[in-house]
Image: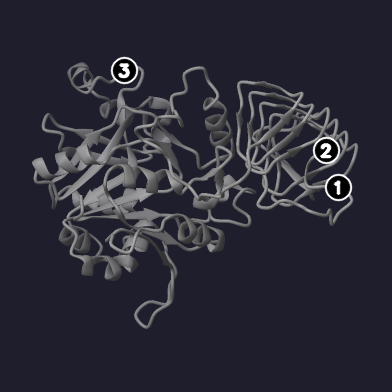
Amino acid sequence: MRDIIGLILGGGKGTRLGPLTEVRSKPAVPLAGKYRLIDIPISNCLNSDINRIFVLTQFNSVSLNRHVSQTYRFGLFSRGFVDILAAQQTPTSSEWFQGTADAVRQSLRFVLPYEPRHVLVLSADHLYRMDYRPLIAMHQERNADVTLCALPVSSEKASDLGILQLDNDSRIQAFHEKPTDADLVESLKLSPTMRERWQVQAERPLLASMGIYVFRPDVLEHLLDDDTQLDFGRDIIPRSLDRHRVFGYVFNGYWEDIGTVEAFYRAHLSLLDDKPAFNLHDPDFPFFTHARFLPPTLIRETRVKQSLISEGCVIQSAEIVRSIVGIRSIVGAGARIVNSLVMGADFYESEANSKVAMGIGPAASIENAILDKNVRIGRGVQIRNAAGRREFDAPNYCIRDGIVIIPKGAEIPDGVVI
């Protein structure tokens, strides 16, 4: 796999995931208490023996750049790298990235000198575990110009995804970006024979693009020669069908788009299932992240049920139920955390510089919430969406999809009820 270059698209604004993306890019959003979203595609690449990787960034990219540069360092005698390609103005282009295809177009001049045999294009806001080697093998066996990864989905999800249709040789016959016409969606459904061939359940009769593409470099360069074509799903893939050999690789594993607050929250809680569909504890396929060398978590007289507790925490006489507690979290005596995601902190506070100490204060109660990093939750605070709002904005918190979000660095004074 040394002749493969991986390109990870991480430059979007990520507005659907706000306010978690107000101060950071979407790939830099914390994940599962100790990771970041970008760690998923990079780890998939490394576990697939792909170790020449570019991450394409644009918005709020400082923390992402820092994380990547501090985490993914290879030895002096390795040819591997994970490098940032940030959007920039040049003598030939004064525009920032205008879409997924445009981001790759502007970055090709850094990629092609490596003379890759294939270019693997990935997104950075999906949660999944995948060995890309069978995908590459199929791409080579079919002598394909382009290969897309396809996921079986229900008819209800068709309008949110790019839906494709395959023939018996897995060649793509049609591709429609986010179709809404009921008759068209019906015509794209897999036949019973095709469902049996790919072991697809009847309730998921459609194949949707996963945003994972393999290109021959010369074909990719040709497809990107028109600078008005800005997006892969909307422009490049439909354009390629009549001119090139485009195939689909069916993936039946777990895959979740966590680009919205609700999807992000639900995916985290699913990690706590008795048999999670996405298992973080697979020793044969680990996920990598920044090595922080934190002390062990200290837990005193605390009840913990079906939760993940990251390293470096101090938890005093609390109750934690079906929640994820991130690195360096401080939880005060009598606090209660239920069905929540606590992202933790970037540093320990040796001396409080505010009336409210960093962390979750004594006797606080947190339910159905996301607490971003470095928040200060005062004594006796109750966060439970008491008014039952679906959407709401306040100076130091917001509600999205009924989930209370405390933004990074926000402070909730003692006794406040949300």
Label 1's element? loop
Answer with mark 3 or mark 1, whichever residue precedes in sequence: 3
Label 3's element? loop
In the image: residue 245, left or right of residue 34: left
Answer with mark 2 or mark 1, whichever residue precedes in sequence: 1
Answer with mark 2 or mark 3, whichever residue precedes in sequence: 3
- Identified at 51% across, 42% down, the residue is 259
Q: Quadrant of residue 202?
A: top left
Total numbered badges shown on the rendered structure: 3
Near mark 2 (Cα within 10 A), the count class, few <14, some 14-19 or many ≥20, is many
- Identified at 43% across, 24% down, the residue is 277
The residue where tag 2 is placed is: 361
In the picture shown, does residue 53 fall above or below 139?
A: below
In the image: residue 39, left or right of residue 228: right
In the rendering, at what x and y percent does residue 320 appear?
Answer: 70, 25
Label 2's element? loop
Circle nearer the viewer, 3 or 1: 1
- Identified at 23% across, 49% down, the residue is 214
Residue type, label 3: Gln
Q: CA distance from mark 2 to mark 1?
A: 8 Å
Residue 356 is tagged as: 1
The residue where tag 3 is placed is: 201
- Identified at 20% across, 37% down, the residue is 134
Near mark 3 (Cα within 10 A), the count class, few <14, some 14-19 or many ≥20, is some
Residue type, label 2: Gly
In the rendering, at what x and y percent does residue 188 appear?
Answer: 27, 29
Residue type, label 1: Val
In the picture shown, does residue 343 fall above or below 353?
A: above
Is the Cβ of the residue at disc 2 closer than 8 Å to that at disc 1? yes
